[in-house]
Image (cartoon, rainbow, N blue to C red):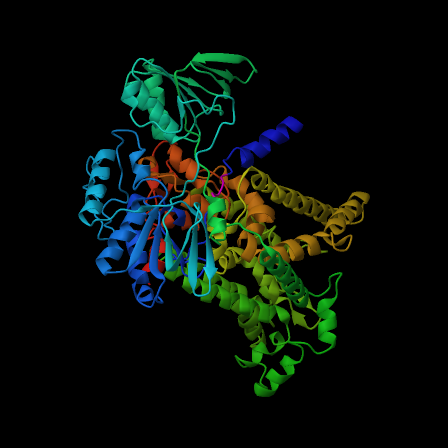
Amino acid sequence: MLSLLNRYVDWLHLQWPGGSEEPLPRVEADFSTDVPGLFVVGELTGIPLLKHAVDSGARVARRLLPECEQSPEGIVPLVIVGGGVSGLSAAVEARRLGIDFQWFEAARMLETVENYPIGKPIFTDPPGHSPQSTLELPSEAGLSREGLLESLQKQALDRDLKPQLAILDSIQRKGESLQLNWSHGESIRAHRVVLALGRSGEHRRLEVPGEDLDHVSPICHDPGAYRDRDVLVVGGGDSACEVAIALAEGGAKVHLSHRSPTLKSASATQQQRVANVTARGSLTVLPETTIQKIGESEVELMGTDRKRITLPATSVFTLIGRKPPVELLRRCGLKMHGDRGAFWWASLVGCMVFFFLLYHWKRTGVAIPIAEKWRSIGGFPAGLDRWWSEWFPQGSSLLGSLTPAMDQPGFWYSLLYTLLVLIFGLRRMRKRPSPYIRRQTWCLFWIQAIPLFLLPYWILPWLGTQGIFDAGVGQSVADALFPFSGDSREYWRAFGLILAWPLFFWNIFTDQPLIVWCVISVIQTFVLLPWAIHRWGKGVYCGWICSCGALAETLGDDHRHKMPRGDRPKSWNLIGQGMLLLCLLMLVGRVMSWTLPESTIGQWGQALALGIQKGIPLINYEWFVDLFLSGILGVGLYWHFSGRTWCRFVCPLAALMNIYARFSRFRIFADKSRCISCNVCTTQCHQGIDVMTFARQGLPMADPQCVRCGACVHDCPTDVLRFGKMGRDGVTVELDLLNPRSGVSSRSADQES
């Protein structure tokens, strides 16, 4: 039994990559930061593109021209720190604009480019895009390390640009200026500072004996210099694969050691190249091995069976990545994505208190009677119905029919909800101006506005005042769908026309079965949704119809990057399966009580259903799941953990649709040759999907969590991703005609505005 359960959870969720988010500073669209006067360009903005580095450096120089002209006497107007491509671009543009600036670099100008292997091809994605910069890039066709380096160095030389050597230690705010402290003890005051440091800090270390020997290095300049020598390359990413291949093709005897069973961190292209070179016998790959000790002429490794392996190696290259310069950035006063300081915690508590009160104000009949207490003292909106009836005394008029809704908190909550979807939906469409995003956002708004707001609170009550439901077919329909509760009909049950079971369970979990609603729910949940999801994926409902998704995609759009990522949050996806199980148990109990009401089995069923739904206060389903998890946490966590925490982790309908989605033809397809591993797609996914891993491998993204929001496709800087379907043969690909991409990323749209 346990084995079957493990296979099920792996099949549904745990087999997919969890992803991670590299710590980067908070940078606005105009490259400003939390520190006034301090700007960040290049890779640290999150896009490791050569053209972006050139473009961002030039843009920030033009942005700062008016401010640098206002620099006080005795303070350097502009200091540029970093001698890479973005720093050079900023310096070139500042020289053209006549800005008085100083330029600093810790080592050598363009050192990162210099450290590329000789002959390395250079790709200047996205094709056809020309940076708005005075610094020019060479022709894209056949560009190599040498061609790029020669061109950039010549342009710097022609303008007599050369950075001063200094290692930055920290930056402090001093009044209206910034003080840059250097590692040798001196400092300089600047009016504005541009950090162009690049994304990588120190090389990661193996932390094994012998790592500091002269023949051990994280950089391979000339692979051809190691012909006929024994070389060990350590690492499983693209850089390690590239170097291992270059060494093997240069005539070296190469072993490639990595910790994983497969080269999952490398792109599919590099994996294939490694396989080809290995098949020719020029390279030996050692998976699941770790370095234990490095000697003068040999290296000791350990395999999975803890068996020691000794290899000859006169040169060792440790290509295991670099540490982001997080500590330096913090010493500069920058805050990183994911930082959780005192304000973060205080604001989280504040959100929880606010939404706790809001949802208890809206909901009566729960263990904590805030709504009843509030109403008893005449709190809003109590009494508004009387005020409204004075203005519109004719109850059968269009406006008069709103009188009963005026003192219902649910009406005002739904009105606010709908307005938020509209206001932030307009902002979303401006930020991501593609036909797909526009159609999706308007679809979400109109579904929220008409069937989920106007229909239950205005249209149906008005029809009722016209006598439509008093006789004939109208009465039969109303009796079946909106039975009386006291003197008024339960028009709120119309939510069930859009919100399917088990998300909206109130039309099913009733003492006596509402037959028509049961039929509608069966058709929705077990016929229409499986059919639609098979064709278009789970996002056909979560991303285009559901009211939870409407608020998440609009109000929550700016917070999508805050979704927790990694293997541990991935396991939290299974919480929804537990919620789905509770709903199924309640359903079984209700059916037993309906079909065998007088029997012991029927009584057991009723006890089971009511025990889960209404049992122990504060842990029963109605309060803990439907109020606390979906409302208080579901909305209250928007500003700290993204707008999809309820949808991803808890929603029982989403949990059921995840199962349907495992049989869907919908995929996100990737052109792996264009993927630059920038991680933008993964960062922008508020369902926590590691989109980048699929893209790097060139594999169709099949994680069932996808809600088709389109952010990953739209924001990809190199146009890698496309929505589509697998053909019925499981091989052919059918790309969607409506593309979420608008031609510019959301960052570019913000910059242009």
Q: Nearer the viewer, residue 206 or 137?
A: 206
The quarter of the displayed image where residue 349 is located:
bottom right
Question: Percent from the top left, x then y, of residue 343?
Answer: 59, 59
Q: Nearer the viewer, residue 356 or 602?
A: 356
Q: Residue at x 51, y 38 (%)?
A: 18
Q: Is residue 680 left or right of residue 452?
A: left
Is residue 514 visible in the rendered image? The answer is: no
Q: Is residue 684 left or right of residue 125?
A: right
Q: Residue at x 61, y 65 (%)?
A: 492
In terms of secondary structure, what is the magenta stretch mainly? Answer: loop
Question: Percent from the top left, x then y, of residue 624?
Answer: 69, 53
Q: Residue at x 20, y 41 (%)?
A: 151
Q: Would you place residue 39 above or below residue 671 in this image?
A: below
Judge whether residue 602 is colored magenta. Answer: no
Question: Percent from the top left, x then y, of residue 664?
Answer: 46, 39
- Quarter holding the C terminus is bottom left
- Quarter holding the N terminus is top right
Q: Which residues are magenta?
A: 19-23
